[in-house]
Image (spheres, rainbow, N blue to C red):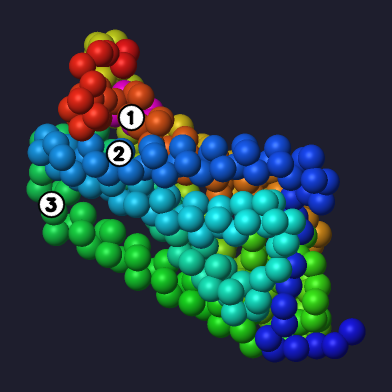
Amino acid sequence: MNCSKNPDFVLSGLSSDPDKQQLLFGLFLTLYLLSLLGNVLLLLAISADIRLHTPMYFFLSQLSLVDLCFTTTTAPKMLEALWTSNGSISFSQCLAQLYFFAVFADMDNLLLTAMAIDRYAAVCHPLHYPLLMTPCRCGLLVGGSWGVANSVSLVYALLLSQLSFYTNQEIPHFFCDSGPLFKLSCSNTRLNEDLMMVLTGLLGISPLLCIISSYAHIFHAVARVPSAQGKKKALATCSSHLSVVILFYSTVFATYLRPPSTPHASGELVAAVMYTLVTPTLNPYIYSLRNKDVKSSLKRVLGIESSWD
């Protein structure tokens, strides 16, 4: 087989059965449209209602924006491959997709961490909350997250761009991910894999430890609240965020806490579909359906007077 620095690939991770392709196309198109609709409506609701111009909703609007970009990075190419049965993609397109995918995946991770810090400040230090979560500090948290995500993603892309790959190979995935690409490389990838594993582990585990620490303090503070109603009110502000955290990390870790060049099993493809398409689709509905302020704002945006409860 020939090796090349600029090969062409074929994405073949979902199904080659025409009947299954039609079914998957309809399912994933529906999920993608629901993701676009839910996140756009949530962004409109937050921007249109001055009562939602708070740190918590600022982070939530950033999460919706990132989720919009996240699904758009992979879904259109996946839908094209299912519709046309042609998953061909050039190496430059592959690298671009991997870079943007990594940026928005890392941003999801870091924004969930920022939201956990915000909830910690709100529950554990309510009297000092306005001083702790100022607009400047919130902006620094988000701006710093964008800087870290871009830097790490650029390293991912640079590590892969230095390798040579077998030409005209199939990638057993529905988007360009690092693991399948390492497997198709005809270069020595050991150092590249080790570096990427270290970066992925640090960027995955460190924010998770921060989230766990925040919720440990939150639950400890809630346990000291004397009334059951007070406990319920305190936990209600965290329940949506905690649901999203569990959904996100359970699917991401199933895929990425392993050596990048190990083969992809069908279960890992399902997990990849969950965090690239299902989770970003569910996020706005989890937050809107469980939040009276967001529901009220959405009803005004849509001109709906009936109750969502």
Horizontal and vertical percent position of residue 108: 43, 52
Q: Give the answer, above or below, for where 66 lies relative to 160.
A: above
Residue drawn at 71 percent across, 68 percent down: 88
Horizontal and vertical percent position of residue 147: 35, 70
Asked whether 74 or 101 is in front, the reply is: 74
Q: Quadrant of residue 219?
A: top left
Horizontal and vertical percent position of residue 77: 60, 59
Q: Main secondary structure of the magenta part?
A: helix
The residue wearing badge 3 is 134
Q: How many marks?
A: 3
Q: Amino acid at mark 2?
A: Leu
Q: Secondary structure at mark 2?
A: helix
Q: Give the answer, above or below, for where 253 lies relative to 234.
A: below
Single out the residue that lies furthest toward the right: 1
Which disc number belongs to residue 4?
none
Q: Secondary structure at mark 3?
A: loop
Other-residue count near label 2 (Cα within 10 Å), few / some / many at <14 / 14–19 / ≥20: many
- Image: magenta residue range: 235-240
Mark-to-mark CA distance, 2 and 1: 7 Å
The residue wearing badge 2 is 42
Say if residue 33 shows up in the picture. Answer: yes
Q: Say if mark 2 contacts mark 1, CB within 8 Å.
A: yes
| Rendered-image quadrant of the C terminus | top left
Q: Give the answer, above or below, for where 215 lies relative to 151.
A: above
* Left or right position of 254 against 203: right
Asked whether 161 or 214 is in front, the reply is: 161
Other-residue count near label 1 (Cα within 10 Å), few / some / many at <14 / 14–19 / ≥20: many
Mark 2 or mark 3: which is in front? 2
Mark-to-mark CA distance, 2 and 3: 22 Å
The residue wearing badge 1 is 288
